[in-house]
Image (cartoon, rainbow, N blue to C red):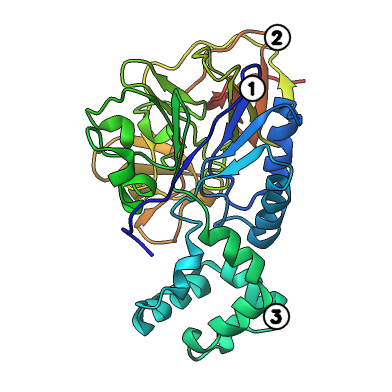
């Protein structure tokens, strides 16, 4: 349930062990396995899953089971994110209206932990008349999974770090925070808040902090003592899954590994940075289609009036006004020999990532 007293876990980590932190896996098993490989995860490391490992991606139930198995090794610890709080469906004060709303969400998304469980039980989600009558069947078949979720802390605290999914209220003891304060704090870095201990968070994709460019790499704010690591895995077409690497329990020498599946190519031609650009993003993506084309459409961002060409397949509907996928017209500064990751190939060139930053390249690749 939302806005309950937060569960806090105290963790003592031995010196000489790396701390690896991954947030917002969102049921994407290939990305999870990929970033663990990139980070060279071993039994001597301490792995923190910093919330939102479920929902939005293709395989919530098996993601959950993989993480449950990792926790049995003793060096994996998990924080509850806002997308992981499914044990709350058994709260005795929960209303039927809340269950009906949940089923509307499940049928809209057509994925997620409840969707997966229903299908494994041979229950067609579209045939359910009342979710309240089905909950007993789910608990009978997935008791260990719900017990694991019910016991997840909302924060893990060490001597120097607090691992929490979204944020926390400054000046208030961690023990007095609510679950909502810890797992639903949107846009933490946009607030004028700082902390005594390092706060390691996910939740808010880091590219949303950008204005004109798109970068998926972790943001380290040393004045505020906040590290934000959500790389937009599943949520963004060019997203990546980040793994923050803390070399030792007392270290602030942060590094990171990242994984995405995009093919790596070599730039053959120098390219100067574009003179101007804009980033249309989730929450502010309403555009007017000025001229619709087969591959690209000329669009005007409604709020700012900025015009750019957008891949037509990124537009959500055929009308004059529509929302769209995140997109940018940023032209990357590149040198021959640079390595890029190719997200889109089109008649005009390539939409690529270079060191985590996304943009267009109009030269040749090998």
The residues tagged by marks 1 and 3 sit, at their Cα atoms, a distance apart of 40 Å
Front residue of this view, candidates 309 and 248: 248
Quadrant of the frame with the N terminus: bottom left
Categorize mark 1 by other alpha carbons within 10 Å: few (<14), some (14-19), many (20+): many
For disc 2, the marked residue is 337
In the rendering, at what x and y percent does residue 309 appear?
Answer: 44, 38
Disc nearer the start of the sequence (2/3): 3
Q: How many marks?
A: 3
Whether residue 112 is visible: no
Q: Quarter of the image holding residue 259?
A: top right
Whether residue 165 is visible: yes
Front residue of this view, candidates 108 and 303: 108
Q: Quarter of the image holding residue 159?
A: top left
Q: Cβ–Cβ below 8 Å for labels 2 and 3?
A: no
Q: Cβ–Cβ below 8 Å for labels 1 and 2?
A: no
Q: Tell me what residue is drawn at x 70 percent, y 57 percent.
A: 65
- The mark closer to the camera, 2 or 3, is 3
For disc 3, the marked residue is 121
Q: Which mark is residue 18?
A: 1
In the rendering, at what x and y percent does residue 131 appear?
Answer: 49, 84
The residue tagged with tag 1: helix, strand or loop?
loop
In the rendering, at what x and y percent does residue 286 appear?
Answer: 32, 50
Quadrant of the frame with the C terminus: top right
Q: Tell me what residue is drawn at x 31 percent, y 51 percent.
A: 178
The residue tagged with tag 3: helix, strand or loop?
loop
């Amino acid at each position: 349930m939302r806005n309950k007293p937060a569960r806090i876990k105290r963790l003592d980590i031995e010196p000489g062990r790396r701390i690896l932190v991954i947030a917002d896996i969102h049921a994407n098993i290939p990305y999870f396995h990929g970033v663990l490989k990139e980070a060279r995860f071993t039994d001597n490391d301490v792995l923190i899953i910093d919330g939102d490992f479920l929902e939005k991606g293709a395989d919530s139930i098996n993601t959950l089971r993989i993480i449950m198995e990792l926790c049995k090794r003793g060096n994996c610890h998990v924080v509850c994110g806002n997308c992981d709080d499914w044990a709350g469906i058994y709260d005795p004060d929960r209303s039927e209206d809340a269950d009906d709303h949940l089923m509307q969400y499940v049928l809209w998304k057509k994925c997620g932990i409840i969707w997966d469980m229903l299908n494994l039980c041979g229950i067609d989600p579209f045939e359910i008349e009342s979710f309240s009558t089905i909950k007993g069947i789910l608990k009978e078949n997935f008791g260990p999974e719900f017990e694991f979720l019910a016991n997840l802390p909302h924060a893990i605290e060490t001597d120097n770090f607090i691992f929490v999914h979204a944020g926390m209220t400054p000046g208030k003891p961690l023990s007095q925070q609510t679950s909502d304060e810890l797992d639903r704090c949107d846009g933490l870095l946009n607030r004028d808040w700082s902390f005594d201990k390092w706060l390691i968070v996910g939740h808010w994709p880091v590219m949303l902090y950008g204005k004109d460019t798109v970068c998926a790499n972790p943001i380290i704010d040393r004045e505020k003592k906040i590290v934000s690591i959500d790389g937009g895995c599943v949520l963004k077409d060019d997203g990546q899954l980040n793994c923050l690497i803390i070399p030792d329990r007392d270290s602030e020498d942060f590094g990171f590994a990242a994984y995405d599946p995009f093919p790596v190519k070599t730039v053959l031609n120098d390219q100067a940075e574009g003179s101007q650009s804009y980033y249309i993003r989730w929450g502010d993506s309403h555009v007017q289609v000025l001229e619709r084309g087969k591959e690209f459409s000329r669009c005007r961002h409604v709020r700012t009036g900025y015009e750019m060409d957008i891949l037509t397949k990124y537009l959500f509907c055929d009308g004059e006004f529509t929302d769209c996928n995140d997109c940018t017209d940023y032209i990357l500064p590149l040198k021959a020999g640079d390595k890029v990751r190719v997200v889109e190939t089109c008649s005009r060139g390539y939409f690529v990532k270079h060191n985590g930053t996304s943009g267009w390249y109009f030269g040749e690749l090998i």
